[in-house]
Every structure is written in structure tokens, then in C-alpha cells.
Amino acid sequence: MICSISSAQFAGGMRGQKEEPLPEGFKPASTNTFISQYPAVNAQTRQAMFRVVAPAAQVVQVDLAGKKYDMTKDEKGVWTCISDPQVVGFHYYAILIDSVPVMDRNTEAYFGSNWESSGIEIPEGPEGNYYRFNKTIPHGQIRSIHYWSEVNGIERHINVYIPAEYEKNPDKKYPVLYLVHGWGEDENGWSVQGHMANIMDGLIESGKAVPMIVVMPSGDIKTNSDVRQASGNITDIYINDLIPFIDKTFRTFTDKQHRAMAGLSRGGFQTCMTVFNNMDKFAWMGTFSGFFIRRNEGIETAFNGIFKDADAFNKQINLMFISTGTEERNPREIVEALKTHGIGNIIFHESQGTAHEWLTWRRALNDFAPRLFK
Amino acid sequence: MICSISSAQFAGGMRGQKEEPLPEGFKPASTNTFISQYPAVNAQTRQAMFRVVAPAAQVVQVDLAGKKYDMTKDEKGVWTCISDPQVVGFHYYAILIDSVPVMDRNTEAYFGSNWESSGIEIPEGPEGNYYRFNKTIPHGQIRSIHYWSEVNGIERHINVYIPAEYEKNPDKKYPVLYLVHGWGEDENGWSVQGHMANIMDGLIESGKAVPMIVVMPSGDIKTNSDVRQASGNITDIYINDLIPFIDKTFRTFTDKQHRAMAGLSRGGFQTCMTVFNNMDKFAWMGTFSGFFIRRNEGIETAFNGIFKDADAFNKQINLMFISTGTEERNPREIVEALKTHGIGNIIFHESQGTAHEWLTWRRALNDFAPRLFK
């Protein structure tokens, strides 16, 4: 298509002229659109360099990982800045043009904080291979599906990861993991920001994880009629809409021993609310950066008393995987208290040196998925 | 996730307060994020109303369908404007904040003109049902797949539409349509902006089109090493990478009678270049808003003389579908000349009242697909 915006105005100034070479050590980020040289990343220093064309703007800043960087304008109206060193993995960011937070035109769009945000991937060394595309192994497929939700009275969009072997085994049934994103993200978070297909492909090919279907719905109620929906309704969608649709559409085992649910941040809370209220339907669960008990509650009363009878809980849940980054609010004390109380099937996973961010959750999935359905 | 940008700054001002009611007759556009009231559309007048929160900006405009609209600021720093009546269907647009074209935070991201752009859908009456989700019929799936391209030395992303019946017929083979987007768009254009799955679901369910696989690749060479790639390389990718991968991955017929290619705008040109140079591999083709002959060439010399021997051409190509909107550059004269010259298998399709835009291409696909593989 041809848009009416004149080429000369394109942020990044990519049309009709070759870019000047990037500073030594910097390469275009993998999160950029395919024509964009910026933002650029220095893999050694883990710094990011940003570039915005805005001759008429008064102040341009970059808002990245909790810090606002003032950009400097050159004589052509091109603004640039270089960030502090970043944690490896994916980070959302925004450009502020005269105080209005907008997306950087140079990156692909990543839905977070309820808008199509900019994102940047800080590359990792060989340690990060588990979440990168591996051309030497078979690949599953992410299926993009719209289905009709009677609960909402609208079509809802989900992504479903199907393991590479699925179509070669037309009579085989598979267990299902339901995997939820965090607040302000959507059903694309795990497959795009999380690289979950690369992680699952590797785990399954190496035999560490059993082949499974992974269903990724939207944790928000998609509707324009309300500004902000509570998450309570999600359980209703799972139980009455989504699980029946998945079991009808794919070759699944439908008993609780073959069904798991996990989520990050608010999705971890949604996992607790859904699993604890439907213990006949799930036997495995994970909360990544999302497991907390309210201040005024103890273990015996939390989640309507689900932990009160530890033996009863242990008989129903094979695995309660609780994960956190070491640089964010840490549920370690609650986990210890639960263990002391007799909850015996907890795995506590800490991601070293990471906060409330995607590297924490990629690592969590990589540790969690091999423990399922065994 | 929790982004560092403070809630109060969110464009659209959606946090912590209910919006004022929309003006009478206006509803949130279907292209918005699920929490955004704006842009709003009046289905009767086909006008769009936009809203941007930018207290510190000097000038804010909306750039839509070739016209820039000045927005008006109220005492809270909220800018609004109402557009002229628009053609129904999907339109890209941009917000200009102090002359910098940026994405409106209120809409989902739609890749066009080589950036993640804002988009707005102007609703149509019952005539538009063919491209809407129909909850009463079976639905195909869009499969999101990364495969390794030896031609490029990178992984490439494609979307593949698989008809609803595919998994119920494990021994059946299917014909394949390769379907390409336009300049500045990407492999998501047809499934997101074009609603191709809804169109194909309806055509197949009604028996108008035969069940087929539709492969949607990126028409650009995804690489950060060059600012702008020529499209010539696309043919190489099709012939040496993509077609072998598809025929290995899915149950396809692999002869030319069961393979078609079509594209919009530049994708139409790419279709001509690929099909005319590989007449042993395709028997059906379509160009939507993308068929032209250079000024200094006639029919006998165009495309390296492919039309010179009309009988030879007619024996090799079952269908050359040429489509255009009536409000854009029209190839009618060339089509007439080709027919006069003896090219006998042309269907010429005109979309009434539309220009170089998605309604033209939705209509074209809806007319083209039923003619294939019969």
C-alpha cells in the first residue's frame, strides 16, 4: 500500500539515503522492523542506542526500564541517546515527544501496558540459545484461531502451540498447558516476547519435556464497552468456553492429570483463581512472578482456605511451581511457610539477576515445562 | 508486565476514570485495542473521530486517506477532530505530534508503509458480511510458522491458512494459493487487514471455492543489513525455499494445475515476475491493483515477451485475474489490448468506488478464489 505520509517525514529517515554506519560494536536490534538500523545494541556493553527524527519537537526522551533518557538533537533535527547497560532479554520502551509517550517507528509492535509498545531485545551469549530459533530441529506451529465465546458473546482470539510431531501421529492424544500473559499484555505475549515456541521446540526435541499442546488466550475480556474489566471472568471463559473448544478441536487428553495452567504476573494470579476453584480439572500449575498472599491473610485463610488441609491439597495438585526474579518482590517466605505447613509438591525457582521482565519468564517456562505430565 | 510510564500519561487517558460518553452515533472502531473508546466511527456518516492526550504539544494532526486534519485542543490538553466521510473498509492513518508521524496508542498495530501504523475500520452494512467472522460456520486456522531459508541464511516467518476440513481428512491433498501483500506491508497483511480467513471460510463453506491452503509470506527480504531490498529475490525464495517447504510440511498437490499465486499492488508485480519466469510451476494467477506495463513497452515486449505468442501463453495459464479499484490507476486499456492480442483467459474485475485500499483487495480475493482449481 502507499500511505499519504511523505517519505521524507519517516522517523528514522530510512528512505532514499543510506544510513551512516552504526557506532563500533553496535548492531540493529532483532526487535526492529526489517529496514531499521536503530535502535542498535552493543552486545558487549549491553547498551542500546536510539534515534528519532523530529526537527520540530522541543524535547525528546526515551523511557526504558524505569529511567528516562534525554535525547540530544543534531543540526538536522535527529535525536539520539545511548542507554545504560541493560539486562539481557526483552524490554518494552517508549519515546516521549514533547511529553507524549509514543511508539518508536523503528521497532515491531509489542503489546504491553495495554498499548502497542516498542520493544528491544538485548542479546545474550550461548546461554540464550534455548529461546532462539534452532534450524537443526523440527518446529511446532503457532495456530492463530478465532472462536465464538458464548460467555462474552463475541469471537475471541487465541494462539495454540502444536508440537512438531502432532500431524505425524494422527491417532495420538496430547496433554494441554494453558499459558497466560501478564497485565496489559495479550495472547501474543508468550509467542512473540517470550519466544515460547523456540523454548518448547528445544525441550521436546531433546526429550526433556513431553510433547504437549500449549494454549495461549487473552487474559483480558476483549470488549470495547468497558474501560477496564476485572480478571474474575477469566475463569468462566476457561471452564465454559475455552477448554471445551480446545478438547473439541484438538486431540487432547481431557482428564485433570493431562491439564496444566500457568501464567506470569497477573496471569499467575489468574492461574491460582482458576485452578484453586476447579481442582477437578487441573493437576499441575505454575505462577511466574505472580504468587502472593494478601497482607491480612495467613496460609490457612488465603485463597478461601485452599491450603488449610495440606494433605487434601497434596493429593489434588501434582506440582505447584512458583517462580520469581531475584530483583523483584520475592515470595520466598510464603513458599517456606507453605512447605512448613505441609504443602509438599512445591518447586521454587529463582531467576538470578532479573526483575519483572521477560528473561525471568523465559527461564521459568524452560524450567517448568519439563516437569509436567510425568 | 508493569511499564515504567506513569498511568496519567497514557494517551487516550483511559486509566482511573470513565470516559465521557461518545458523541451520538459514534462507536469505538473495531480496530481499536480492547480498552480504547477512540477512534470512534459513525456508521451512518462514515466519519471517524480521533482523540489524543498531549498537553505539551504545539500542533497535533491526523493524517488519513491523503488528508491532514488539524486537531483542536481543550483546556485539559486533549486534542480531537472528526474526519470527512470515508470509504468503508480498512485505512491506515498516523497522528502527527509537532510534525512527527507516530502511531495512535488507541489502535492495534497494522504494518504498512514499513512501520507499525495505526488503522481504522469503517464498518459496512450487510454487504460486508463476507469478510466478517461468521459464528455459524467451521473456521480454518492461520498457522504462524518460522522456517529456515537457505536463500537468505535466516529464519523467515510465514502465515498459512489451513481450511477447516483439513484435519478431518488425513489422506486428502490440497491445492495451494500463494498470496502476497503490498509494498511496505508484511506477511500479516492479508490475515489482519484483509480478513482473508473470514473470506475463505465463507467461500469454502458455501461451496463457491474448493478447499485450499493459502500461503502468505513476506514479500520483503527480511534482513537488517540493507535498508531497502529489491523485490527480485522473492522469486528465488519462492522457487528454492518456500514451495519445497510447503510441499514437505503440508498435504499438497505439487503439480502446476494445483498451484496459484496472487498479490496486491507490488505483490501483483511480484506475482507476474515469479509466474512468468516459472510457467512450469503455476497455472493460475491474480494481480490486484498491481498490473501495469512500462510506458516504453508494448504487449509483445512486456515481461520479456511472455505475451508474444498468445496461444502458447493460453496453453500454460488457466486464469490471469486482473483487478483494480475504479478510483485508482486503471489497467483497463492494457487488458483490452491483451484480449485483442489473443490472451483468452483474462478476468478483469473492478471494485466500484474504491481506490488503492483494502476494500478493493478484499473484494478481489472474494471474486478470485472461487475461480481457482476448477
Image (spheres, coloured by chain):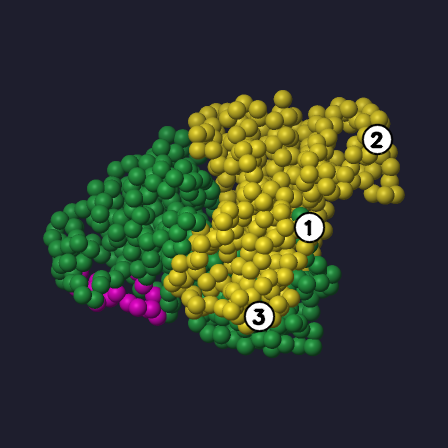
Chain colours: A green, B yellow
Quadrant placement of the N terminus of chain B: bottom left
Q: Is residue B318 above or below residue A87?
A: above
Q: Which residue is mark 2?
A: B337
Determine which quarter of the picture holds residue A31.
bottom right
Chain containing the residue with disc 2: B
Q: Secondary structure at mark 3?
A: loop
How far apart in space, not on screen, are marks 1 and 2 (Cα)?
Answer: 27 Å
Three-letter amino acid code at disc 1?
Ile
Residue corresponding to mark 1: A2
Mark 3 or mark 1, whichever is nearer to me: 3
Tell me the subunit letter for badge 1: A
Element type at mark 1: loop
Discs 3, 2: same chain: yes
* Label 2 secondary element: helix
Q: Which mark is residue B57?
A: 3
Is label 3 on the same chain as label 1? no
Residue A29 visible? The answer is no
In the rendered structure, the answer to whether residue B324 lies left or right of residue B244 reads right
Picture coordinates of residue B271 (x, y %)?
70, 39
Distance between the Cα atoms at labels 3 and 2?
Answer: 54 Å
